[in-house]
Amino acid sequence: MFWPHWRGVRCKRILTLAAAGWLLATALLPGTPMRAAPAETTDYRRLQELYDHIAFLTGLTWQSVAAIDRYETMLSRTHPKTRPLSERTTVGIYISPERWAGYLNPDQSDQNPSSIRVFGGIGLDGSGDGLADRENDIDLLYTVTHLVRIGGSAGDDFAIGLWDYYQNTRAVQRILQFEKIYSAFNKLDLSQHVFPLPLGSVYAYRSTWGNSRGWGGARIHEGTDIFARHGVPVRSTTYGIVEVKGWNPFGGWRVGIRDLDNLYHYYAHLSGFEKNLKVGSIVKPGQTIGWVGNSGYGKPGTSGKFPPHLHYGVYRDRGLVEWAFDPYPMLRRWERAEHRSLRAHKE
């Protein structure tokens, strides 16, 4: 059995890990053709087992492993044509055949760890079955995390390892953010969302996506305006991390929150911020982050140029750039779901 990265480890332990890896691989690999990205219905229990296993092999935390897979998953969902995933995998990691087997390797489907290494490929055997299988969840995750882990896992070592692998500052930032979110709540299922204003408050909104804006030059409205009384609490719609807080000439006092779907949630025209909120704070759905106001359209502190309302926008990170999309359908969906949840709770 070939384990080049486990020199000095007792044979008995290797066989135990190999057996555990084989059993986990058997449980996780259903075996069908190709898919664009991981299914929306997530089996968190199976993923947790996988992340725990890879964490044991590499010495990274399961949160770090989950953060890497989450980032890769978001890239694969955003770029399905250039990052086609196998139906055999439940993770979002994509490694091209050339990079896996080696660019000069005449056999681009090579699964032999020894020949892959000879040709400069990065594919590794993490399951202990003697194969470096590009369609095996364990091998895929082990390959990436092993390369990230080479420099160590203490202090800044993880960030440095991420940079060495991705060569992309944005990738490093996103994965570290995801790791922090997972660590704060210590669970994988962080998919809950709520409406940004309390449902018991008085508010009104409709789709305002694409409407023309007058102040600051010709531009379109990239979001949904929710009109409410001055001072109504504004809530985080999602689990996430505060990425931006402060003044923006257009949005006034605003907060930007990044979630685990790599979406940037933009809350603008606030009258103020929750006192403990700062850049880097971890938030959860329903947590107050500020209050409805009418700030903006001028220098810091400008307010009163329009009726009080919350401007809510959402931007998707495509890896190099971010683009806005209409949040109105999501707002309606979250509002209905929260109403149903409240009714069910009363019953």
Image (spheres, helix red, strand yellow):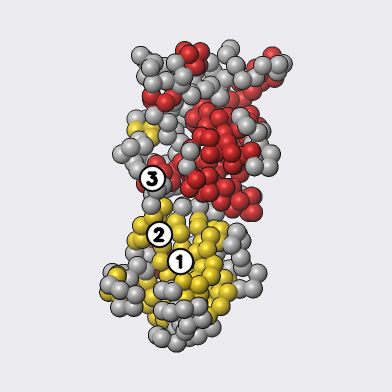
Spatial CA distance of label 2 from label 3 is 15 Å
How far from the left and from the top, in percent, is residue 13?
Answer: 70, 19
Q: Which mark is residue 22?
A: none
Q: Which residue is mark 2?
A: 315
Helix, strand or loop at mark 1: strand
Sequence-earlier tag: 3 or 1: 3
User: Residue drawn at (47%, 42%), measured in percent from left and top?
Assistant: 168
Measured in 3D between alpha carbons, the distance from the residue under mark 3 to the one under mark 1, in whole angstroms, is 22 Å
Q: Residues within 10 Å of mark 2 (few under 14, many from 20)?
A: many
Q: Nearer the viewer, mark 3 or mark 1?
A: 1
**Mark 2 vs mark 3: in front:** 2
Residue 299 image position (x, y, % from top left): 47, 78
Marks 2 and 1: CB-CB under 8 Å?
Answer: yes
Q: Is residue 180 left or right of residue 271?
A: right
Residue nearest the observer in this picture, 192 or 173: 173
Left or right of 137, for residue 328: left
Residue in front for this viewpoint, 9 or 105 = 105
**10 Å neighbourhood of mark 1: few (<14), some, or many (≥20)?**
many
| Residue holding disc 3 | 77
Residue 57: % across, % down: 63, 29
Please give the residue where the numbered disc 1 appears in the rendered image. Answer: 266
In what element is the residue under mark 2? Answer: strand
